[in-house]
């Protein structure tokens, strides 16, 4: 159904969005803090929830996570600095750095701030150990098989660059440098199939037994899916937890030590909390195809172009006319970029699709739903387009949590 924004349970309702449209220059992102709180509640069974901030790394979102006792994952020096500026503490495990390599600057800051490292390669262990003996580390293990919503998000198996293939090879390095192994981690792409999950849990148990060191934590990684389409079911968290809890208990029994179970979601916590608001600026026919062109491009929302991802789209008319849900037209939605891939209605591999949408007029607004994860955080300056505003709705207040970048700011880097 083209025109559907949940008007009862969410702040992302038509009234609020119409208010914002009057106030702010399109396009912009809007997040509803309540939706994030509700998602956090669903994961309370886990001992530690660690937000994978790359999904939505705005410092105000990170502060919100911190106030709710979440910890945070960082995958770059920039993300470490974001976490620190949002109030997460150094010299603790509030921030963990996960990567498959260190650049020199990041390595030196990690040692300075004393941030635990979740290492995805043996070289990381050597480089860290040789200058920071005793450093707290996790091993990110490649379970030798993968899963993901797209080839580009599959994070296990021979075609993945992530993780350590044979963790037993890490043991002599850990010994040599006196590194402190505190946890094991597996992150297997995005999407959940419970049979597949059993295999992952089993691989974690096997690795823990093989390594046979008294660790404190295991991490289930992220990858919890959300229903992007109306006919998709939300994940069964109870079932998900139960499988990991079983694995934790087996490892705990084997090692004769308590093990804390950590989960590291990105998408699950924030995807549904965010929308992208954009405006229709041109409508044209290409042969028999109806194209609607909007003021947001794949530099703003990358997922459809990058993965062929589906986002539900709804329409808010710019005037007082009523949208007739039954008077629809097959529509291709494109952006302003000088790039033929700048199409929001495409499948993986770049095949252009149409979407059944109401007949639109210039000036109408298009809302891209469930774009709180990998939306703003994947944006770029391609075509010299400034990053757009982010607005957070919290306790019935609207707060700009990132202003629009200026073109002068972009140019100043080159002066
Ligand atoms: C990306 C990532 C996550 C989060 O993935 P989601 O699919 O957003 O939950 C978690 N852990 C690591 C190491 C990641 O790289």
Image: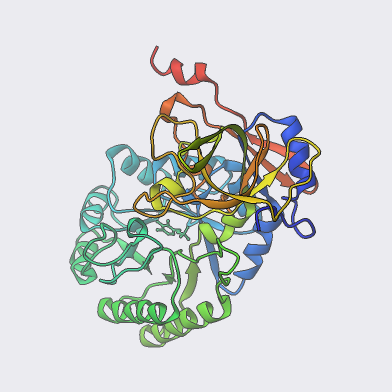
Q: Give left or right: position of 99 versus 391.
A: left
The residue positioned farthest toward the top in the image shown? 415
Q: Residue at x 79, y 41 (%)?
A: 321
| In this picture, residue 277 sits left or right of residue 145 | right
Which residue occupies 31% across, 75% down? 213
User: Residue 22: x and y, percent?
Assistant: 76, 32
Image quadrant containing the C terminus? top left
Relative placement, left or right, of 334 versus 170 is right
Residue 66 visible: no
Along the line of sight, which residue is nearer the eye, 211 or 206? 206
Q: Quadrant of residue 110?
A: top left
Residue found at x 43% / y 76%:
193
- Ligand 1, seen in the image, is in the quarter at bottom left
Q: Which residue sits furthest front?
A: 288
Return the residue nearer the eye: 95 or 92: 95
* Quarter of the image where the N terminus is located: bottom right
Query: Which residue is more in the foreground, 376 or 85?
Result: 376
**Numbered marks: total:** 0
The image quarter in which residue 71 lies: bottom right
- In the image, is residue 153 above or below residue 414? below
Rendering colour mode: rainbow
Up-down relation of residue 363 to residue 176 (above or below): above
**Observer-nearest of 236 and 124:** 236
Residue, x 52% and y 78% (percent of image)? 241
Q: Position of residue 99 (x, y in %)?
A: 33, 52
| Residue 311 in the image: above or below residue 194 | above
Q: Position of residue 378 (x, y in %)?
A: 46, 43
Residue 200 can be seen, yes or no: yes
The image shows residue 165 at horizontal and vertical percentages of 22, 67
């Amino acid at each position: 159904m083209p025109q559907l924004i949940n008007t009862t349970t969410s702040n992302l309702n038509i009234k609020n969005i119409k208010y914002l449209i009057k106030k702010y220059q399109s396009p912009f992102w809007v997040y509803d803090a309540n939706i994030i709180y509700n998602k956090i509640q669903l994961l309370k069974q886990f001992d530690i929830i660690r937000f994978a901030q790359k999904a939505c790394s705005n410092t105000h979102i990170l502060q919100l996570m911190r106030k709710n006792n979440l910890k945070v994952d960082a995958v770059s020096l920039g993300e470490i600095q974001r976490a620190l500026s949002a109030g997460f503490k150094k010299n603790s495990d509030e921030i963990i750095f996960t990567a498959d390599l260190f650049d020199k600057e990041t390595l030196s800051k990690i040692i300075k701030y004393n941030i635990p490292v979740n290492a995805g390669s043996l070289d990381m262990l050597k480089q860290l150990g040789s200058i920071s003996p005793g450093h707290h580390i996790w091993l990110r293990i490649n379970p030798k098989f993968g899963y993901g919503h797209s080839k580009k998000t599959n994070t296990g198996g021979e075609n993945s660059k992530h993780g350590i293939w044979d963790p037993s090879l890490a043991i002599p390095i850990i010994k040599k440098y006196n590194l402190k192994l505190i946890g094991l981690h597996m992150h297997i792409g995005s999407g959940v199939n419970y049979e597949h999950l059993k295999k992952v849990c089993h691989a974690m148990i096997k690795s823990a037994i093989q390594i046979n060191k008294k660790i404190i934590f295991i991490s289930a990684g992220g990858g919890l899916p959300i229903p992007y389409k109306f006919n998709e079911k939300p994940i069964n968290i109870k079932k998900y937890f139960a499988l990991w809890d079983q694995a934790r208990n087996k490892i705990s029994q084997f090692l004769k030590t308590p093990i804390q179970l950590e989960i590291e979601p990105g998408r699950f916590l924030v995807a549904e909390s965010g929308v992208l608001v954009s405006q229709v600026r041109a409508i044209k026919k290409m042969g028999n195809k109806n194209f609607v062109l909007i003021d947001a491009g794949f530099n703003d929302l990358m997922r459809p172009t990058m993965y062929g991802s589906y986002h539900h789209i709804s329409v808010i008319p710019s005037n007082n006319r009523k949208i007739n849900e039954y008077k629809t037209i097959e529509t291709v939605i494109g952006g302003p970029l000088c790039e033929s891939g700048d199409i929001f209605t495409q499948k993986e591999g770049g095949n252009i699709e149409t979407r059944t949408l109401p007949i639109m007029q210039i000036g109408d607004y298009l809302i891209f739903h469930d774009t709180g994860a990998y939306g703003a955080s994947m944006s770029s300056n391609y075509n010299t387009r400034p990053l757009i505003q982010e607005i957070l709705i919290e306790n019935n207040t609207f707060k700009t949590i990132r202003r629009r970048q200026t073109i002068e700011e972009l140019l100043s880097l080159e002066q």
